[in-house]
Image: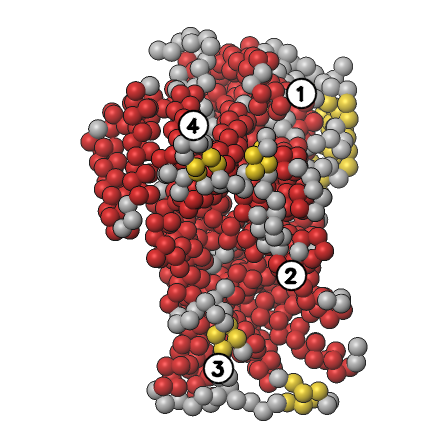
C-alpha cells in the first residue's frame, strides 16, 4: 500500500515537473536521467522492482483508487491551466481509444488500421444529433458508441473471411471509405468544412463550456471535460479489464492464437469476431463523441489514416494486449511531444520511429501483457 | 447403435481425389487405427470428419445426426474432438488455459454477466479451473506442475500430452488423434503409448480414431485398423487380419526396407 | 462518348493501369518469395519520384540539357539504382530482423518505416510540405493519332513500363537467378537444402521490386508533372490491391490486376457523374469485394488451409 502510494506520487510529481519546467533541454535531461535510473534500478535492485510489480499486480483495486484520487487533484495542481488540461483531456481520449483498439487487435488479433473511422462515426453522431436534432449530449454519447459498434460489425463482416495482411488492407480501405463519405455527404456532414458550433453539454444546469468555479478557485472549462473524460476512462478500464479476465476474454485470446483450432474446439468464430469488432469500435465511438463535444468542431481531416496509425503506435509502445500498457502508451505519446513543440514538424516522424524501434528492440512493449494466473483449486501433487 | 457412421466419403481438390469412397463405422469405446503412407489422405479424412473440409459426396453420421452443412464448432458440440498433426496449441496461453478452451464453460459465459462481475460467472470460471486441473491429473504431476507455463515453453512430449488433455476436456464421444507420435523417438513413442492407454482406461466409453503411418505403434492400442492408399480404403478389419492382408503387404508394408 | 474522348480515356487508363502494375509486381514478388507485405513499398515509389527530381536538378547544374535523351537515361538509371539500394536497406534493417515474428508485427514495422520515409522526405526536401513541380525530363513532340492529340509522356511511360515488366519477366523465367527466385517462392526450405543462397535471393528480390516501384514513381512524375511527399500512401494501397486482385504471389496476375484497377478507376471517373470524388471509394469497395469473395485473386483457385 505504502509502496504503491509512494511510486504513484513520484509519478505525479514527475509529471508536474514536466509541465512546469519550460526549458525543453532541462526536461529532456530529467527524462533521460529518469530512464537511466529505472534501467539501473532494474539491473541492480531487481528484487525491489519485482516486489513493486508484485505489489501492483496483487492490489489492482488500490492502485486504481490511488491513481483516481491523484488524478482528481490534477486540475488544481495545474492551477487550472487551460493548455495542459486540454493536453491531458486528449491523452485520456487517446487512452480510451487505445483500450478499444487494443481489445480488437491485441486481444482478439483482428488487426485494424482504420480505427479512426469509428472515432469519426462517434464524433459525427454526437455532432449531428446535438447540433441538428437538438438531442441531449447524454443520450447522444451512448448512441455514438452504439453507431460505432454497428459500423464495427459492418467492418467485421468482411473480416469473417479474411485475415492477416488482407484484413489490414480491408481495414485501411474501410477507414478511407468512411472519411471519403464524410467528405462527400455534404448535406449531413458539412463536407470539407465539417460541423461547427457543436453545443457543449450541460450537466445538472452547469454549462460544461464555461469555467468551473469553486468559489476559492476558478478552473478553465477544460476541467469539466477533464473530470468527465476521467470518469469515462475509469469505466472503460474496468469494463475492458473485466472482459479480458473473463472466460470470454480467454476465448478471444485463443482465437488470436489459432482461429482454426479455436473453431475445432467449439468456438463460433463468427460470433466472437463480430463481438470483438463491436466492442472495440464502441469505445472508439465514445471517445469520438467526447471529442466532438469538447472541441465543438469536427472535420473529416481530423479522422484520417494518421490517427489510426497513432493509436496503433500507442498500443505497440505499451505492449499488445496489455491494459496498463495501452493507457501508458497513450499518455506518453500524447504528452511527451507537447514539450517539444519547437520540433512540431518531427512529431509524425517520431511516431513512426517509435513503431520501428519498439518492433525491432522491444516487441513486448513497455508494460508487457501478464498472463492470468489461475490458482488450481486442487493443489495436489505440487512437488 | 453406431456412434460414428461414415458412408462413401469422397473429396476432390481440383482434379485430385484425396479421399475416395471411404466407409467405416465406429462403436462407443472402440479404437480405430488409420494407417497409410504420407499423402494417402489420412489427415484429409480427419479434416472431413471435423468439418474443416466439406465432402464432395458421401455422408458422416455422428451420434445419430448427419453432419452435413454443420460448422466445425457445431460438430465439436456433437461430441467430436481432435488433435492436429503439427500441434496447434494456443501457443501463448498457459497449460491450464489451453485445457479450459476445451471446456463448455468457456462458451457458456454470458458477456454481460462477466462485465457486471456476477457471481454466476465467477462460479463458472472457478468450475472451469477445477475441471481443467482435474483433467491434467490423468498424467499425474507431469502437467499439474507446469499449469501456469505458456504452451510454447513446454517440452515436446508435454505438448502432446497437453493436446490430448485439451481434446478430452469436453468429454467428447470421439477423439481424432492425428499422428500423435510424429517427431518422437522410440522411447518417447512408448511413453506416449502408455499415456494413451491411461486415457483409454480412464475413459472407457471414449471412441478413438488414431492416424499413424507406423503400424507397430498402434498394435497394442487399436481394436480395428483401416489402411488408406491414394485415398482409397484398401483394407479394413481387425488388426491381425489386416496385417496379414496381401494387398496391404504389397501396397504398404511390403516396402519393407523403407523405414516408416 | 465520342471516339476521340474514348481513345484519350483508354490511354489514360492504360497509363494508370501499367503504373499500378509496376507497383503491384513488387508487392507480389515480396509476398511470393519472402512472405511479407511491404507497406513501405509505396514510399519507395514516392522516393523514386523525388530521386528523379533531385538527380535531374544536379545533372542540369552539371551541364546536361533538360529534356535531352542522355539526361533522361541518366535519371532513369539513377532511379533504378536508388530504388534497388532502398530495397536492400529495407531487407537488411527491417525485413530480416523481423523474420520469424508474427505477421502482424512485420506488417506494422513496414508501416512504421513508411511513415519515417514519408516524413523524412517532407522535412529534407526544401519546401517539402507542398507539391513539387516535376521537370519535363524528355522533350517530345505531341503525337497525333487519328486527329487525337496525345501527350507523349503517356506513351513514353507506357512503353517504358512495358519494357521493364518484360525485363522482369525475362529475369524470372529465363535466368538462373530467376530460377532460384522461383524455387525459393515455391518452397524455401527445399531451396535452401538444394544449396540456393536464400538470403541473397531475398535481397535481390527486394532490390528488383523496389527498383521497379521507384521507376513507377518517376513515371507518375512524368505523366502528371507534379509530385508530393504523401503520394506513396495511395500508391501502396492501390498497388497492394492490384496485387491482391491478381492473386498475391502471381506476377502476371499482378500485372493484370494493375491494368484492371486502372481501367475501372477511369471508367468510374468518366461514366459516373461527379465520379472523381468517388474514384477511391469505388476502387476500395472493389478491393474489399475481391478480398472477401476471391481471396486467392481473380485467377486463383480456391485455397485450402493446410492443417
Where does label 4 land, which residue?
A68
The local crowd at label 3, few if under 14, some if 14 to 19, many if 20 or more residues have their Cα within 10 Å, is: some
Which x, y percent locates residue A48?
25, 25
SS at badge 2: helix
Q: Residue at x 24, y 48 (%)?
A: A26
Give the residue number, with chain letter if any, for mark 3.
Answer: C135
Query: What residue do we see at 65% from left, 58% from top?
Result: A191
Q: Which residue is mark 1?
A: B79
The tag earlier along the polypeptide, 2 or 3, is: 3
How far is mark 3 from mark 1, CA to CA?
71 Å
Near-viewer residue (C293 or A286): A286
In front: label 1 or label 2: 2
Q: Is residue B129 above or below residue A149?
A: above
Q: CA distance from mark 4 to mark 1?
A: 49 Å
Instruction: Determine the secondary structure under disc 1.
Output: loop
| Relative vertical location of residue B122 with respect to residue C12 in this rendering, above or below | above
Marks 1 and 2 on same chain: no
Residue B183 located left or right of residue A251: left
Q: Position of residue A187 (x, y in %)?
A: 72, 56
Q: Chain of mark 4?
A: A
Residue C215 at x, y percent in the picture: 49, 72
Q: Which residue is mark 2?
A: C280
Q: Residue at x 79, y 77 (%)?
A: C1
| Residue B109 in which image quadrant | top right
Using the image, determine if residue B78 lies above or below residue A126: above
Q: Nearer the viewer, residue A42 or B169?
A: A42
Q: Chain of mark 3?
A: C
Query: Closer to the camera: disc 3 or disc 1?
Result: 3
Amino acid at each position: 500500500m505504502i509502496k504503491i502510494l509512494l511510486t504513484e506520487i513520484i509519478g505525479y510529481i514527475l509529471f508536474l515537473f514536466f509541465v512546469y519546467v519550460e526549458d525543453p533541454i532541462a526536461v529532456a535531461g530529467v527524462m533521460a536521467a529518469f530512464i537511466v535510473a529505472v534501467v539501473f534500478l532494474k539491473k541492480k535492485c531487481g528484487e525491489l522492482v519485482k516486489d513493486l510489480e508484485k505489489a501492483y499486480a496483487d492490489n489492482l483495486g488500490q492502485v486504481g483508487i490511488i491513481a483516481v484520487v491523484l488524478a482528481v487533484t490534477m486540475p488544481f495542481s495545474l492551477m487550472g491551466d487551460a493548455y495542459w488540461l486540454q493536453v491531458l483531456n486528449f491523452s485520456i481520449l487517446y487512452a480510451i481509444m487505445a483500450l478499444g483498439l487494443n481489445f480488437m487487435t491485441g486481444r482478439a488479433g483482428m488487426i485494424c488500421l482504420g480505427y479512426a473511422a469509428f472515432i469519426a462515426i462517434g464524433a459525427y453522431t454526437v455532432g449531428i444529433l446535438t447540433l441538428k436534432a437538438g438531442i441531449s449530449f447524454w443520450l447522444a454519447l451512448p448512441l455514438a458508441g452504439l453507431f460505432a459498434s454497428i459500423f464495427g460489425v459492418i467492418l467485421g463482416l468482411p473480416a469473417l473471411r479474411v485475415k492477416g495482411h488482407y484484413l489490414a488492407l480491408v481495414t485501411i480501405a474501410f477507414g478511407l471509405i468512411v472519411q471519403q463519405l464524410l467528405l462527400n455527404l455534404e448535406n449531413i456532414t458539412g463536407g470539407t468544412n465539417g460541423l461547427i458550433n457543436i453545443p457543449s453539454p450541460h450537466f445538472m444546469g452547469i454549462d460544461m463550456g464555461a469555467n468551473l468555479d469553486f468559489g476559492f478557485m476558478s478552473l478553465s472549462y477544460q476541467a469539466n471535460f477533464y473530470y468527465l473524460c476521467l470518469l469515462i476512462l475509469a469505466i472503460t478500464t474496468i469494463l475492458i479489464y473485466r472482459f479480458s479476465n473473463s472466460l470470454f476474454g480467454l476465448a478471444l485470446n485463443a482465437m488470436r492464437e489459432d482461429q482454426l483450432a479455436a473453431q475445432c474446439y467449439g468456438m463460433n468464430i463468427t460470433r466472437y469476431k463480430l463481438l470483438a469488432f463491436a466492442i472495440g469500435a464502441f469505445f472508439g465511438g465514445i471517445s469520438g463523441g467526447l471529442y466532438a463535444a469538447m472541441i465543438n468542431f469536427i472535420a473529416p481531416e481530423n479522422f484520417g489514416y494518421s490517427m489510426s496509425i497513432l493509436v496503433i503506435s500507442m498500443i505497440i509502445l505499451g505492449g499488445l494486449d496489455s491494459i496498463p500498457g495501452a493507457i501508458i502508451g497513450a499518455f506518453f505519446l500524447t504528452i511527451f511531444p507537447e514539450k517539444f513543440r519547437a520540433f512540431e514538424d518531427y512529431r509524425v516522424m517520431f511516431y513512426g520511429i517509435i513503431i520501428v524501434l519498439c518492433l525491432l528492440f522491444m516487441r513486448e512493449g513497455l508494460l508487457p501483457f501478464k498472463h492470468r494466473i489461475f490458482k488450481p483449486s486442487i493443489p495436489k501433487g505440487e512437488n | 447403435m453406431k456412434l460414428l457412421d461414415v458412408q462413401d466419403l469422397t473429396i476432390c481438390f481440383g482434379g485430385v481425389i484425396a479421399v475416395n469412397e471411404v466407409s467405416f463405422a465406429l462403436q462407443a469405446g472402440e479404437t480405430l487405427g488409420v494407417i497409410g503412407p504420407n499423402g494417402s489422405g489420412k489427415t484429409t479424412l480427419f479434416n472431413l470428419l471435423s468439418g474443416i473440409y466439406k465432402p464432395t459426396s458421401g455422408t458422416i453420421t455422428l451420434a445419430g445426426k448427419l453432419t452435413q452443412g454443420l460448422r466445425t464448432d457445431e460438430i465439436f458440440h456433437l461430441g467430436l474432438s481432435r488433435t492436429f498433426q503439427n500441434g496447434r496449441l494456443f501457443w501463448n496461453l498457459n497449460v491450464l488455459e489451453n485445457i479450459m478452451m476445451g471446456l463448455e464453460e468457456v462458451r457458456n459465459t454470458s458477456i454481460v454477466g462477466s462485465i457486471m462481475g456476477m457471481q454466476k460467472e465467477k462460479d463458472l470460471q472457478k468450475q472451469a479451473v477445477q475441471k481443467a486441473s482435474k483433467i491434467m491429473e490423468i498424467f499425474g504431476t507431469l502437467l499439474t506442475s507446469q499449469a501456469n507455463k505458456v504452451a510454447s515453453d513446454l517440452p515436446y512430449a508435454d505438448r502432446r500430452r497437453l493436446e490430448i488433455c485439451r481434446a478430452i476436456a469436453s468429454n467428447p464421444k470421439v477423439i481424432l488423434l492425428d499422428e500423435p507420435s510424429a517427431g518422437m523417438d522410440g522411447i518417447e513413442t512408448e511413453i506416449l503409448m502408455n499415456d494413451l492407454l491411461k486415457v483409454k482406461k480412464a475413459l472407457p466409453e471414449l471412441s478413438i480414431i488414431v492416424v499413424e503411418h507406423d503400424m507397430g505403434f498402434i498394435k497394442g492400442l487399436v481394436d480395428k485398423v483401416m489402411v488408406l492408399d491414394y485415398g482409397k480404403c484398401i483394407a479394413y478389419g481387425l488388426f491381425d487380419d489386416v496385417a496379414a492382408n496381401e494387398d496391404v503387404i504389397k501396397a504398404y508394408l511390403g516396402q519393407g526396407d523403407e523405414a516408416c | 462518348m465520342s471516339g476521340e474522348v474514348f481513345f484519350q480515356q483508354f490511354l489514360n487508363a492504360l497509363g494508370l493501369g501499367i503504373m499500378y502494375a509496376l507497383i503491384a509486381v513488387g508487392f507480389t514478388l515480396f509476398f511470393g518469395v519472402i512472405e511479407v507485405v511491404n507497406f513501405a513499398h509505396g514510399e519507395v515509389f514516392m522516393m523514386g519520384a523525388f530521386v528523379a527530381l533531385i538527380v535531374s536538378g544536379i545533372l542540369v547544374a552539371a551541364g546536361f540539357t533538360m529534356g535531352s535523351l542522355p539526361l533522361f537515361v541518366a535519371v532513369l538509371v539513377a532511379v533504378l539504382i536508388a530504388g534497388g539500394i532502398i530495397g536492400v536497406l529495407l531487407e537488411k534493417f527491417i525485413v530480416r530482423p523481423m523474420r520469424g515474428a508474427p505477421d502482424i508485427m512485420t506488417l506494422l514495422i513496414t508501416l512504421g518505416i513508411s511513415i519515417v520515409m514519408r516524413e523524412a522526405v517532407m522535412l529534407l526536401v526544401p519546401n517539402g510540405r507542398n507539391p513539387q513541380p516535376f521537370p519535363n525530363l524528355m522533350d517530345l513532340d505531341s503525337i497525333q493519332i487519328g486527329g487525337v492529340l496525345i501527350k507523349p509522356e503517356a506513351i513514353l511511360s507506357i512503353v517504358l513500363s512495358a519494357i521493364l515488366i518484360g525485363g522482369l519477366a525475362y529475369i524470372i523465367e529465363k535466368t538462373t537467378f530467376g530460377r532460384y527466385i522461383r524455387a525459393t517462392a515455391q518452397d524455401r526450405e527445399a531451396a535452401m537444402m538444394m544449396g540456393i543462397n536464400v538470403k541473397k535471393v531475398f535481397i535481390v528480390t527486394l532490390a528488383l521490386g523496389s527498383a521497379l516501384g521507384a521507376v513507377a514513381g518517376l513515371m507518375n512524375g512524368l505523366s502528371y508533372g507534379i509530385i508530393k511527399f504523401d503520394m506513396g500512401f495511395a500508391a501502396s494501397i492501390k498497388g497492394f490491391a492490384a496485387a491482391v486482385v491478381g492473386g498475391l504471389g502471381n506476377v502476371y496476375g499482378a500485372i493484370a490486376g494493375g491494368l484492371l484497377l486502372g481501367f475501372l478507376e477511369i471508367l468510374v471517373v468518366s461514366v459516373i457523374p461527379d465520379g472523381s470524388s468517388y474514384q477511391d471509394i469505388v476502387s476500395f469497395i472493389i478491393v474489399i469485394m475481391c478480398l472477401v469473395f476471391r481471396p486467392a485473386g481473380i485467377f486463383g483457385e480456391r485455397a485450402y488451409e493446410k492443417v
